[in-house]
Image: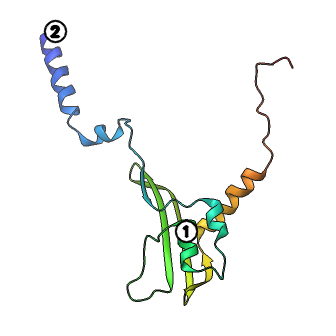
Amino acid sequence: MKKVLIAATMLASLTACTPKLVEKLPYYKLPVIQGVPLEPKSVLAIQAGMTREQVQLYIGAPLLRPSFRDTQWDYNYEVLRGGKVKESRNLTVYFQGNVVSRVEGSALDYAREQIAQQNQPQQEKKSWFKFNK
């Protein structure tokens, strides 16, 4: 009995040291948010003809400004969980002089979807518990 107990203890202590076993254990990983979070209404408000100052008032300072060209501002947003990208959006604002010429990026599609969802009437959730009205 003593030999079996010693062998089981040694086996358990050896398996505790393996990295593959540790990787499989469930633990909470904090989400890492990188970039500028963009509000859907603010993103959709950016239109051609706006000045740089107006753009900055709506969505803030850009994350990336090219050193040699000042014709575009890039806004990037990522949420990482467990080392994997869960959300990723980008927005690029192009300028001619001091005025917006065009806007493009995945943040526009996301903003349109969010606004459309907000405008849809909310459906009542069915419950097993009935209230008397």
Q: What's the colour scheme? A: rainbow
Instruction: Give the mark nearer the N terminus: 2 vs 1.
Output: 2
* Position in image of residue 36 (x %, y %): 48, 62
Q: Give the residue type at disc 1.
A: Leu
Q: Residues within 10 Å of mark 2 (few under 14, many from 20)?
A: few
Q: Which residue is mark 2?
A: 1
- Horizontal side of 76 relative to 17 (left or right) equals right
Q: Secondary structure at mark 1?
A: helix
Which of the 4 image quarters holds residue 113? bottom right
- How many neighbours does mark 1 have within 10 angstroms: few (below 14), some (14-19), or many (20 or more)? few
Residue at 40% x, 48% y is 82
Q: Nearer the viewer, residue 47 or 29?
A: 47
Along the horizontal axis of the image, is 55 left or right of 112? left
Q: Amino acid at mark 2?
A: Met
Q: Nearer the viewer, residue 91 or 45?
A: 45
For the C terminus, the quadrant is top right
Residue pointed to by mark 1: 57
Residue 3, position as x, y percentages in the image: 12, 15
Mark 2 or mark 1, which is nearer to you? Answer: 1
* Percent coordinates x, y for residue 120 in the rendering: 79, 50
